[in-house]
Image: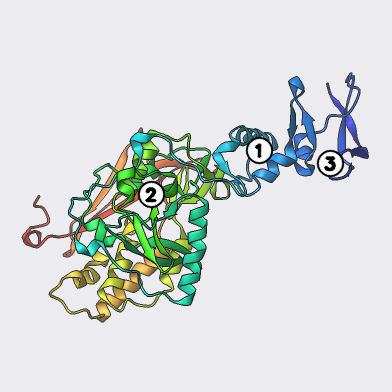
Amino acid sequence: MTSIGTMIKEIIIPHRKGNIRLNPEFVVLEDAHIHGFLLGTDYQMMYGIDIYKSKNRNINIAELLNEFREGQSSTTLTSKQKLSLLKMLRKNRTAFAIGEEPLGKIRCHDIELYLHVERFYPPMLRRPPYPESLETRKEIEKHLNELLDMDVIRKIGHNEIVEMTTPVLITWHDGKSRLCGDFRALNNYTRADRYPIPRIPHALDKLEKSEYITKMDCMKGFHQNGVKPNSIKLLRIIFHMGIYEYTRMPFGIKNASAHFQTMMDTIFQEEILEVWMCNFGQQELLALGHKVSGLSLAIDQNTVAAVLLKPVPKNIKEMKLFLGFASYYRVHIRNFAHITSSPYKLSSKYLVFEITKERKDAYERIKHELTNAPVCILPELKLPFKLYIDAACSQGLGAALHQRQIVDGEPRERIICYISRQLKYSEFKYGSTQD
């Protein structure tokens, strides 16, 4: 069939919220034995028009869009791809929290949280509540009601024996508060869980050559994990409204991350996802402090900006926090170990904290490198690599891993990562050619 022209035709489509009046442009086909109009999915998605499939099954595009309106999908997806995505999400509707949804719970007994603490419990595990300001009390009461509604905590009965209590803290981030038990004393007496945690660089490397990337976030992921009955008594918190205990895994305990990773590697179907925190079919997105795609890895400058606005560190703790943050992005910074050698010396207990000109210059240079860091490419394992090394520096060793890849139709050599470390005391005596 061939097109013989176009025409604009006014049509009126019934809709539950009132009739829709459209003036779409139609293509007229020669010798087309079609009695009626064919309306594309772009109009259906735009105006929430109902369409019918086989077996009299009604699919309402408006309902799909309304339920998943907070989930972000790529603008590069076609209308057909978006429709397929929405139908797939609709099919798995129960996996997402849309509106006021009950909190999910992992229902596999084998992966409930278990804390091993030797008895008898020392006195330092029985602690009184911290002093609270009026603002803190309001936030505690707000979070308490939310946790009670979600069955994350329960109030201790008057006749129950209480052997340990933990005070609570209110932490703030981006203007939002979070209730967290101060479990530091409990953590000191808890046997560590050695389950391996995936390394972030390895996870990012797996994105190589990915055409579409999807990111999904669990709704209060820690609180979806149950706690074994004999461990609940260890998770009792105390504040001005009494004593409560966690029946789900809380924030701040020693083995929370290891247990959560165990759960992720074991079971997914009981997890409830936060739809507004999900991104679907993206060619690039922000994740783990980076801007990632199937081809490259860059620093998320929104994350860096908040740190760079802070003044020069005034004590060892602030300096360690800054260096730890910068070290997370060290693969993007050439000669990172050499640049930070002077600030790192402040970690020694034998030195008095002092911001000299050399250390201030190093601090400013790190900030400059973070904001001007190169975009690293993801490695292609089937292609050869180039390794450039530098052992001429008196403060440390450095290297750069490169690879020649096709970029915009032309072969180009690009950086994959920078590698560096400081010299040990005995290594200062080595010559540049010694192993």
What x and y, as percent, mark residue 215? 50, 44
Instruction: Tell me, yes or no, if residue 53 can be seen here.
Output: yes
Q: Nearer the viewer, mark 3 or mark 1?
A: 3
Depth check: 197 or 136 in front? 136
What residue do we see at 84% from left, 29% from top? 38
Which mark, residue 82? 1
- Residue in the foreground of this view, choosing between 406 and 418: 418
Tell me the distance, in whole angstroms, between the alpha carbons under discs 3 and 1: 23 Å
Badge 3: residue crowd in 10 Å (few <14, some 14–19, many ≥20)? few
x, y percentage for residue 146? 52, 57
Q: Amino acid at mark 1?
A: Lys
Inspect this view and state whether residue 174 appears: no
In the picture, the disc for residue 16 is 3
Q: Earlier in the sequence, mark 2 or mark 1?
A: 1
> Residue 268, relative to residue 121: is it above or below?
above
The residue singled out by tag 2 in the image is 249
Q: Quadrant of residue 193?
A: top left
Q: Which mark, residue 109?
A: none
Answer left or right for 116 relative to 261.
Answer: left
Secondary structure beneath dot 2 equals loop
- Sort mark 2 into few (<14), some (14-19) or many (20+) by Cα contacts within 10 Å: many
Q: Residue at x 90, y 26 (%)?
A: 36
- If you read the primary sequence from the N terminus, does the residue marked by circle 3 or circle 1 appear first? 3
Q: Residue 222: image x %, image y %? A: 41, 49
Could you tell me how far apart the alpha carbons at marks 2 and 1 are, in whole angstroms? 36 Å
Q: Nearer the viewer, residue 4 or 289?
A: 289
Secondary structure at badge 3 equals loop
Point out the image quarter for the N terminus.
top right
Question: Which amino acid, by three-letter code, is at mark 3?
Answer: Arg
Query: Amino acid type of disc 2?
Result: Met
* Mark pair 2, 3: CA separation: 44 Å
